[in-house]
Amino acid sequence: PYEVLVIGGGPAGASAAIYAARKGIRTGVVAERFGGQVMDTVGIENFISVPYTEGPKLVASLEQHVKEYEVDLITEQKAAAVKKGDYIEVTLESGATLKSRSVILATGARWREMNVPGEKEYRGKGVAYCPHCDGPLFKGKRVAVIGGGNSGIEAAIDLAGIVEHVTVLEYGDTLRADAVLVRKAESMANITIIKEAMTTEVLGDDNKVIGLKYKDRKHDEMHVLDVAGIFVQIGLVPNSEFLRDTLELTERGEIVVDSHGRTSMAGVFAAGDVTSTPYKQIIISMGSGATAALGAFDHLIRTPAP
Ligand code: FAD
């Protein structure tokens, strides 16, 4: 059995594995795809101390750093269940079971996509999901934010300070964001909010986004909006479906953790985008991976081995 078994190989999982292995304890990592969301990221400008890098390059360094230590790295395997016996047992989709004295869940999250033509083709070429990450790339340009919930309106307020103009497109007839955010957005001269608008297509010139098409649902009319960027803010979905009946989750499916990264099951810790910790960023997920590993180590030295 392992002493620490990390599920997930994104920045949170990699960080947790390095911190655990540096304690000299038997550490394993199971990851469906090493690198996680960072593999899908083009430019990264907010990984502090590195002014610019690219996703695959950062992932290569993460992997190299993990491999400096004695870590069993098991990729292309997906965890399907976590159960507590003498050890914590993690069952994989392949049917195999791994045992460990402690487990760190770092399975991350995925952005909900619009699923319209052009979205995939122009991802990273104008279609963006993270205003903190990509907002500055659109300085002085016109952008759209898809979604009028809290994250959409927060994104609009954030972007309005950087870009020339922001149009928010909300599918429903009311905004779902908190009233204080809506008032703030409405008070800003360079934000326009359009309700009952269904985005139907991302338009591009083969290299980058040049606009989008949306349907005015009330009047059943099609419109084109000229924008250089489209921020999709219709939800971040945690990869926690397999834990639904096992751990305490928030109503959005995030694993509830305390300040030590502990979950509702003793010996099981969690880190990164899959948790209830706010602000989903690479640097934050790495920090929480370190916290969870140190939390797990603390747990191990206080708990007799089975
Ligand atoms: P993830 O990166 O999501 O990794 C999850 C890991 O778990 C993966 O290895 C996955 O394969 C694995 N996994 C999932 N389910 C299972 C399972 N059941 N069993 C086994 N393994 C599983 N942040 C920034 O700070 N700066 C940026 O510029 C930036 N740009 C971004 C651009 C894009 C397009 C996206 C999508 C995100 C961006 N982010 C950025 C956010 C950042 O990528 C995330 O905050 C970060 O990757 C979260 O790390 P994580 O380790 O928690 O999860």
Image (cartoon, rainbow, N blue to C red):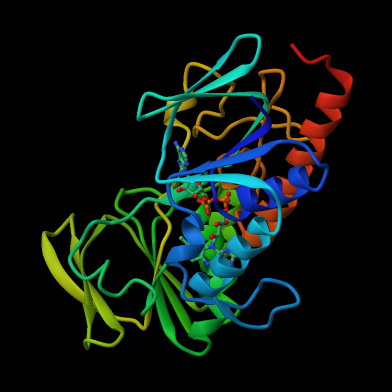
Please identify the quadrant where the C terminus is shown.
Answer: top right
Q: Position of residue 171 (x, y in %)?
A: 29, 53
Residue lying furthest right in this view?
Answer: 302
| Quadrant of the drawing holding the N terminus | top right
Q: Residue at x 34, y 56 (%)?
A: 170
Report the residue that reaches farthest toward the front. 70
Q: Residue at x 71, y 53 (%)?
A: 69
Please tell me which residue lies in front, 194 or 147: 147
Q: Residue at x 64, y 57 (%)?
A: 67
Q: Which quadrant holds residue 154?
A: bottom right
Pick whichever, 67 or 36, lies toward us.
67
Residue 188 visible within the image? no
In percent of width and height, residue 65 lies at 67, 62
Q: Nearer the viewer, residue 290 or 22?
A: 22
Q: Is residue 1 above or below residue 37?
A: above
Above or below: residue 6 compared with residue 62: above
Percent position of residue 273, x then y: 57, 47
Q: Is residue 276 above or below residue 180?
A: above
